[in-house]
Image: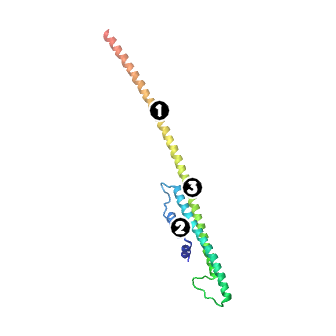
Amino acid sequence: NSSYIAKVLNIEPFFDELDPLIRDRPKSTPHFNADSELTDLSQQADTFLLHSSGVDEIDDEEESSDQEETRGDHDEVEVVEEPIISTSQKRPSEDESSKKASKKPRKGAANIAVSLLRMVEAKAEIEKEKIKHRTEIDDKRFELEKEKMEIMRQQVAIRLQESKERSLRLELEIEKLKEKNRRENQE
């Protein structure tokens, strides 16, 4: 009975598309794109609601035509004692009870779809915030690494300068010693 209602309401395709997303989606996706998933689910929900509202419009049209038919049936009842009701025609009490029964699942299915959509939107927002937070942390790490590299570069430059100064001092000492040796050799 519920599968018949689902077929009548045309909600099976929507849930068939939605089930893999809910059931098969991994807990954490390394490259989760919240915007595209949210857009896909929004489109699916819009499609579902469009189909659902289309069914409502068709039901309203059928209801008004059924009411006209039943009015005609009542007229016939007054004229003819026992009208023969074919299987294609619906009795007013059956029609009203089936309409009430079919509208409740449709509203329930729409509420479920809206709830699922809200849950997915909330999860997408959480994922966006996580990605934003991770990006901020990565940016800060990158900046710290840049500063660390700059400090190391400056330290290397200072050591290089100190080495140059030492080598110049040593060259001066060597020149002084050479000069001293020349003087001693000349004497």
User: How many discs mark residues in the rendered view?
Assistant: 3
Q: Label 2 amino acid?
A: Phe
Instruction: Residue 17 in the image: state x and y as whole percent.
Output: 50, 66
Q: Report, in whole angstroms, how far the alpha carbon at label 2 lies from the one at label 3.
A: 23 Å
Seen in the picture, residue 41 relative to 96 is either above or below; the reply is: above
Crowd around label 2: few <14 · some 14–19 · many ≥20 (10 Å):
some
Q: Which residue is mark 1?
A: 154
Q: Label 3 amino acid?
A: Glu
Locate residue 109: give its quadrant. bottom right
Q: Is residue 106 left or right of residue 181?
A: right
> Mark 1 or 2, which is nearer the eye?
2
Query: What residue is rendered at 41% in x and 27% in y?
Result: 163
| Image quadrant containing the N terminus | bottom right
- In the picture as drawn, the residue positioned furthest to the right comes out as 78
Query: What residue is rendered at 52% in x and 60% in y?
Result: 40
In this view of the protein, which residue sits in the foreground, 111 or 170?
111
Seen in the picture, residue 141 relative to 101 is either above or below; the reply is: above
- In the picture as drawn, the residue positioned furthest to the bottom comes out as 81
Q: Label 1 amino acid?
A: Gln
Q: Secondary structure at mark 1?
A: helix
> Mark 3 or 1, which is nearer the eye?
3
Q: Report, in whole angstroms, how far the alpha carbon at label 3 lies from the one at label 1.
A: 43 Å
Q: Which residue is mark 2?
A: 14
Query: What residue is rendered at 51% in x and 41% in y?
Result: 143
Q: Secondary structure at mark 2?
A: helix
The first of marks 1 and 2 along the sequence is: 2
The first of marks 2 and 3 along the sequence is: 2
Query: What residue is rendered at 31% in x and 9% in y?
Result: 186
Q: Which residue is mark 3?
A: 125
Q: Is residue 126 left or right of residue 160?
A: right
Q: Secondary structure at mark 3?
A: helix
